[in-house]
Each structure stands twice: as C-alpha cells, then as structure tokens.
Image (cartoon, rainbow, N blue to C red):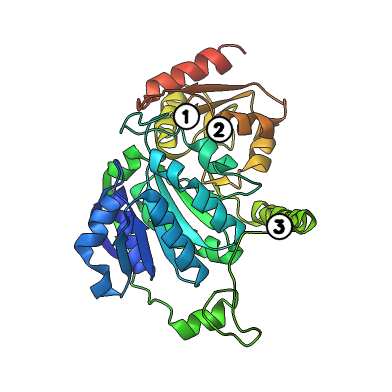
Amino acid sequence: MGELRLMKGNEAIAEAAIRSGADGYFGYPITPQSEVIEHLAAQKPEERTGMTLLQAESEIAAINMVYGAAGCGKKVMTSSSSPGISLKQEGITYIAGAELPCLILNVVRGGPGLGTIQPSQSDYFQSVKGGGHGDYHLIVLAPSSVQEMYDFVELGFDLAFKYRNPTMILSDGAIGQMMEKVEIGEQKPRLTEEQIKEKYPWATTGKTKDREKNVITSLELEPEKMEQFNRKLIEKYRKIEENEVRYEEIQCEDAEYLMVAYGTSARICQKSVQIARNEGLKVGLLRPITLFPFPRKRINELADQVKGMLSVEMSSGQMVEDVRLAVNGKVPVEYYGRMGGIVPSTEEALKDLKQKIIGGK
C-alpha cells in the first residue's frame, strides 16, 4: 500500500502530475481550480524532478505552450475551469488536429458566461461533443472521487500517448475542492531526450533517421487530403470506442429501474440507490467513467432489463441525450438536474425517479 494523504482533488491532480513523470505544466489561475498551480508551486517540481512549471499570461498562451511541448514528445498538461477552457478551445483543436498527446483538466463551474464559481456539470457538451471546430474528439474521463482525480492523471497520459490524442479529466468544483484520503504512488522518472526520440518517432526533436526535420501541423489545404485525414481520425475514434469504454455498475444485477450519473451526481445517486433499496425498490446506478467513449452498448443492454432510466446531472440535461440515443427507444428515459451551481440532494433525485419512472408504472 502506498503513502496515504488527506488532499483536495485539485491538490491530488497536481501531485499526481509530478509523480507521473510529467515534463511540464502550463496554466493560469481560475476558481475553483487554482489549487492545482498553487500546489505545484509549493512543491517546487523543478527541484524534485526537473518538471517545468509556468504560469502563462493567459489561458490562450497556456494551451499553445502545451501544443509546442506536446509536439516535442513531452508529457505535458494544463488545467482550468469552464470560461478558461472556452478560451483554450482553438488550441485544443490544433492539438487534436496535429494528433498530439496532452492532458487537460476542467474543474467545471456554472455558466454560461462568468456564471458562478460553484460546481456544475454544464460543460458536458463542450468537452464530450467537442467545443472547438472540426470533426474531432477528446478522450474524456469523469472522476467521482479525489482518489480518481489522482489515478486519472496517469491513466489520462497513458491514453493520450497510446492514441496520440488529447485527454480531458472532466471534474467539477465539488470534487476539486473536497478533501479525501488518497493513496499516493511512487515517483516515476521523466523520459530523457534519447528515450523520447526512440519511443516517439513522430515528435519534433530535430534530425531523425528518416528525415532532416519533423513538422507538426494541423494544416492541410487540399480538400481531398483533409477528408482523408478526417477519415483517419474517425477510424482512431472508432478504435477508442471499441477498446477504452469504462464504467461502474452499482446494484445493477437485479435492477428494475436505473439511474445514470457521473462525477458528483453519481455520488449523490449512489446514496439514492441505497435509500431506494431499503424501501424495497430495485434501483441500480450506471456511472460512466469515460464520457468519450460513452458506455452506449452497456446502457442499451440494461435497457432490455429495466423499466426506465433517469439521467441525473448538474446541468440542464446534456448527458441525457446520449443516454436516450443508447437506449434507442426501448424504455422511457427522463432527466433530473439542478443548475447554477446547486448540487441536487439524494432525496430530490430519488423523488424524481419515483415520480417520472416508477410512479408511471
């Protein structure tokens, strides 16, 4: 068993970045994720591992620093909260278009606009559907605990480099700010320049065996070649959907009714399931861990078993669209959520399930 610490979610992300052997972090403070860069600064990663830490002049500058470093095969990340992620969108599409790996943390707050600094899940469309331009996807991980905030850093980097694709950890202000016990892993070494050249021949590291120079770009002026490249991306996303779907099932074996929720909402629904079970109601919970790829196949299978589903969200109902697509009309799918930084209660979620799904049967 590793070292145990009591940490905020944002602090866990920062510590995990150092221990994963990350080469750099480029970011800009914004509530409720500022503790990421604050923890990194306090830990002096440049002394611990040689990791570069830089507070950029803006979110736009930060994501373009990530773009440049990722093109060199470096293990780099950034973090922000909703309005800041909006500013990063152009750079994110460049990184996706250049097929480069990086890790992006979004600690979601309520919106639109400046909104509120309270927790929300209203960036689902922006993150899962692609908030920038063009046909692209991020790999999206949704933690529901501080431990997963820590664990998903290494997983996120692994997936990013495996598929040469940006990975996003889609958290929220509640998980970013809450404190829980975290098991800390061992320090991993950073790769040397020679190891990067050997392991990542696509990286821009100067001269290579095959060519005088590498050029990293997302630009293609010929429509036929651009379409061919888009088809290549689509095939990559198809492989990700085949191989990387992750989810958790809670008391789904005999469930007659299903709640679907991720992140903080899933924590709430887990308690709702316990209360329902104590009342003799066979309710289960499906928690998507990857939002892209979304667990469509498993939700469709559960639709053959249950009488109805309720998507519980801290938004106006963004994920419910994907749940309904997965169910494909087999059973009723309803939505319950709160907005503006209000976190729904276990009682509210269960009451809505009874009224909309159970009560109608």
Q: Please give the residue where the numbered disc 1 appears in the rendered image.
A: 313
| Foreground tag (3 vs 1) | 3
Counting residues from the start of the chain, the first of labels 1 and 2 encountered is 1
Report the disc number at residue 319: 2
Q: For the residues marked 3 and 1, what is the alpha-carbon distance in whole angstroms?
A: 41 Å
Q: In this view, does 311 lie above or below 243?
A: above
Number of other residues with Cα within 10 Å of mark 3, as a class: few under 14, some 14 to 19, many 20 or more: few
The residue labelled by disc 3 is: 221
In the rendered image, the vertical position of residue 360 relative to residue 92, given as above or below: above
Residue at 31% of width from left, 75% of height from top? 50
- For the C terminus, which image quadrant? top right
Percent of width and height locating residue 23: 38, 70
- For the residue labelled by badge 2, is the local secondary structure a helix, a strand or a loop? loop
Q: Do the residues labelled 3 and 1 touch (CB within 8 Å)?
A: no
Looking at the image, residue 220 lies above or below residue 122: below
Local crowd size for mark 1, using a 10 Å CA cut-off: few (<14), some (14–19), many (≥20): many
Q: Residue at x 58, y 56 (%)?
A: 96
CA distance for labels 2 and 3: 35 Å
Instruction: Give the residue type at disc 1.
Output: Glu
